[in-house]
């Protein structure tokens, strides 16, 4: 494509290990299962995969509660299985990005057990955020912070003599105590963890809760009317504090040391990459994480949360490109992941134009329209994959998978459901095991009963039903990825076409030398629009006698320029 480093334009596919492929038949996906399916990714045409955590964990939060940062949970396999996965992926020219979870550990991590045993004031407790409670008897939490999964962000401990003791901070579940990033020992440990995986040959990290590590001095009460995803995040004392940037400067220098250590594999394009999960607003504050000496990428969640409206999408794209561009960073694009309702479902709700909610949908909620959702999702993906920068796909979106929106309460595992007393459905609906076949007890996911039931519609979406089928979602993704690569869209420059009809996004992509490469149009109006002449490269749905129907995206080739 170009001589720019891979992470500036890569398409990266997220694998959620519990739900991708189960080789040993225990109903939970595993590393050998993933390895056995890697050809699917090579055939799809992505550049890399990102693995959500497979580390030793009690699985209270799907593995984002890590009890040993340096080993594979037996549920998923062994370190040797991970090595085999990386080797196979590299054979297939796929890079492997792994998750690192530096904000917290599991309460089963040896550090936290030692902290509880050692008692107040000990160096063991100083790795976490322990504080006395408020009120005469310390029975009130140290401040008013709330857990992302509902309820207070503090849990009180019990001293060895049975009396109530200090409280510890957990921005997530009570089984996920926050580490204290003012402690140099914490820095040293996580840097050593990065080296451990880099030495095993991984190509980068996705950094969990990257904006949360450093808390405001004195842990002041928060203004609970603010929301980190919509308001200026740094106004909240637990998010986006200036000190996090020091962490990432050190991490960037660390991963740079590994550049050029695998040239036999990657030639000159031999960088390791850091991508931060940072729910930070506004775009300029997010861009501070990708200054040249910090992270390579952050997820651009604003795009994911943008309503399905032309003006909103255009503003979101402009804002994102301008803010990243101002610091010389590539932008990233993402529409689905393991924490949000899949876009094929989200966009099928009656008010997708107004609401950009990403909270899980359950049987008691309004049920989305799957046909409309998939149609819009395909158009949204075709728009996203034309945008300059790097793009993330979430497992199964290439099959058009919707969320399971009718999961019964008894099977739910996301801690959000229990912590909210059942008022928030949680994220299980987007984590349902992938169908690899159209029959069998778990639709080819594995020989056992899957850990979450699959909805009836999944059988028809298995790859075997779609491969080679004109118009299928799988073939659409394959074609989008192939054309994107051929035309170098990931490193192109975007300009908007001035003459587009209202509610149509129309953009032109230019090469570095100013040559026009392609035009892309997404029709968000409710009527078809006339298309200018030009060779259609790919369309997210059938065209209507040369016109572009609503909720459809088309890429056309520009010739003669
Ligand atoms: C991130 C993960 C999410 C997890 C949380 C706590 O947001 O994506 O799945 O629950 O961090 O680790």
Image: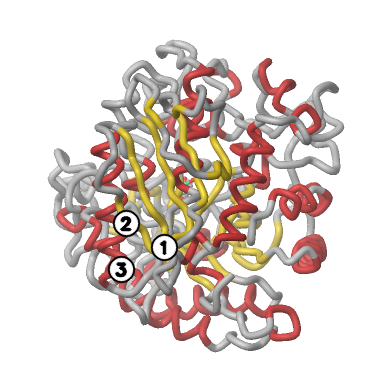
Q: Is residue 339 visible?
A: no
Q: Is residue 237 above or below residue 411?
A: below
Instruction: Report the Cα–Cα distance between label 3 and label 1.
Output: 16 Å
Other-residue count near label 3 (Cα within 10 Å), few / some / many at <14 / 14–19 / ≥20: some
- Nearest the viewer among 3 and 149 is 3
> Depth-wise, is mark 2 or mark 3 nearer the camera?
2
- The colour mode here is secondary structure
Percent of width and height locating residue 181: 35, 70
Residue depicted at x 33% and y 59%: 212
- Nearest the viewer among 548 and 163 is 548
The residue pinned by badge 1 equals 510
Mark found first going from the N terminus, 3 or 1: 3
The image quadrant where one finds the N terminus is: bottom right
Instruction: Report the Cα–Cα distance between label 2 and label 1.
Output: 8 Å
Other-residue count near label 2 (Cα within 10 Å), few / some / many at <14 / 14–19 / ≥20: few
Which SS class for mark 3?
Answer: helix
Instruction: Report the Cα–Cα distance between label 2 and label 3.
Output: 14 Å
The residue pinned by badge 3 equals 325
Mark found first going from the N terminus, 2 or 3: 3
> Depth-wise, is mark 3 or mark 1 nearer the camera?
1
Q: Is mark 3 within 8 Å of ligand 1?
A: no
Confirm or deny contact between disc 2 and disc 1 (CB under 8 A): yes
Q: Is residue 214 visible?
A: yes
Confirm or deny contact between disc 3 and disc 1 (CB under 8 A): no
Other-residue count near label 1 (Cα within 10 Å), few / some / many at <14 / 14–19 / ≥20: many
Which SS class for mark 2?
Answer: strand
Percent of width and height locating residue 551: 43, 27
The residue pinned by badge 2 equals 495
Q: Is residue 290 left or right of residue 428?
A: left
């Amino acid at each position: 494509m170009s001589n720019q480093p891979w992470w500036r334009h890569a398409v990266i596919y997220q694998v959620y290990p519990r739900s991708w492929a189960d080789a040993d038949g225990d109903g939970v996906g595993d590393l050998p299962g993933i390895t056995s399916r890697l050809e699917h990714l090579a055939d799809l045409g992505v550049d890399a995969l990102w693995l959500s955590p497979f580390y030793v964990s009690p699985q209270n939060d799907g593995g984002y509660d890590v009890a040993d940062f340096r080993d594979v949970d037996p549920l998923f396999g062994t370190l040797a299985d991970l090595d085999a996965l990386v080797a196979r992926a590299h054979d297939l020219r796929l890079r492997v990005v792994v998750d690192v979870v530096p904000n917290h550990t599991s309460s089963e991590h040896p550090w936290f057990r030692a902290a509880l045993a050692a008692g107040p004031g000990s160096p063991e407790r100083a790795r976490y955020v322990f504080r006395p409670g408020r009120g005469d008897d310390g029975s009130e939490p140290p401040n008013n912070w709330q857990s992302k999964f509902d309820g207070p962000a503090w849990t009180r401990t019990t001293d060895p003599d049975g009396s109530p003791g200090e409280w510890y901070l957990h921005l997530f579940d009570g089984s996920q105590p926050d580490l204290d990033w003012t402690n140099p020992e914490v820095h040293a440990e996580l840097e050593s963890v990065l080296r451990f995986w880099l030495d095993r040959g991984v190509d980068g990290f996705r950094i969990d809760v990257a904006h949360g590590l450093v808390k405001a001095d004195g842990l002041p009460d928060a203004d609970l009317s603010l929301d980190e995803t919509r308001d200026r995040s740094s106004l909240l004392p637990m998010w986006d504090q200036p000190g996090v940037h020091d962490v990432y400067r050190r991490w960037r220098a660390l991963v740079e040391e590994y550049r050029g250590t695998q040239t036999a594999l990657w030639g000159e394009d031999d960088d390791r990459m850091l991508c931060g999960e940072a729910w930070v607003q506004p775009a300029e504050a997010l861009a501070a994480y990708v200054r040249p000496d910090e992270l390579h990428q952050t997820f651009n969640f604003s795009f994911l949360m943008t309503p399905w409206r032309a003006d909103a999408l255009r503003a979101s794209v402009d804002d994102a490109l301008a803010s990243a561009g101002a610091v010389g960073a590539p932008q990233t694009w993402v529409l689905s992941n393991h924490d949000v309702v899949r876009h094929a479902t989200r966009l099928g709700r009656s008010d997708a134009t107004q609401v950009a909610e990403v909270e899980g949908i359950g049987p008691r909620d309004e049920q989305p329209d799957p046909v409309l959702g998939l149609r819009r999702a395909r158009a949204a993906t075709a728009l996203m994959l034309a945008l300059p920068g790097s793009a993330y796909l979430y497992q199964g979106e290439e099959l058009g998978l919707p969320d399971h929106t009718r999961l019964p309460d008894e099977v739910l595992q996301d801690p959000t459901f229990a912590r909210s007393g059942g008022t928030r459905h949680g994220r299980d609906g987007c984590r349902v095991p992938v169908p690899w076949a159209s029959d069998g007890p778990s639709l080819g996911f594995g020989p056992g009963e899957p850990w979450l039931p699959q909805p009836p519609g999944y059988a028809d979406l298995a790859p075997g039903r779609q491969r080679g089928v004109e118009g299928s979602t799988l073939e659409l993704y394959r074609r989008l990825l192939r054309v994107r690569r051929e035309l170098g869209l990931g490193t192109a420059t975007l300009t908007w076409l001035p003459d587009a009809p209202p509610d149509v996004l129309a953009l032109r992509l230019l090469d570095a030398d100013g040559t026009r490469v392609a035009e892309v149009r997404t029709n968000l109006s409710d009527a078809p629009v006339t298309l200018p002449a030009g060779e259609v490269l790919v369309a997210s749905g059938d065209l209507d006698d040369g016109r572009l129907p609503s909720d459809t995206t088309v890429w056309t080739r520009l010739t003669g320029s």
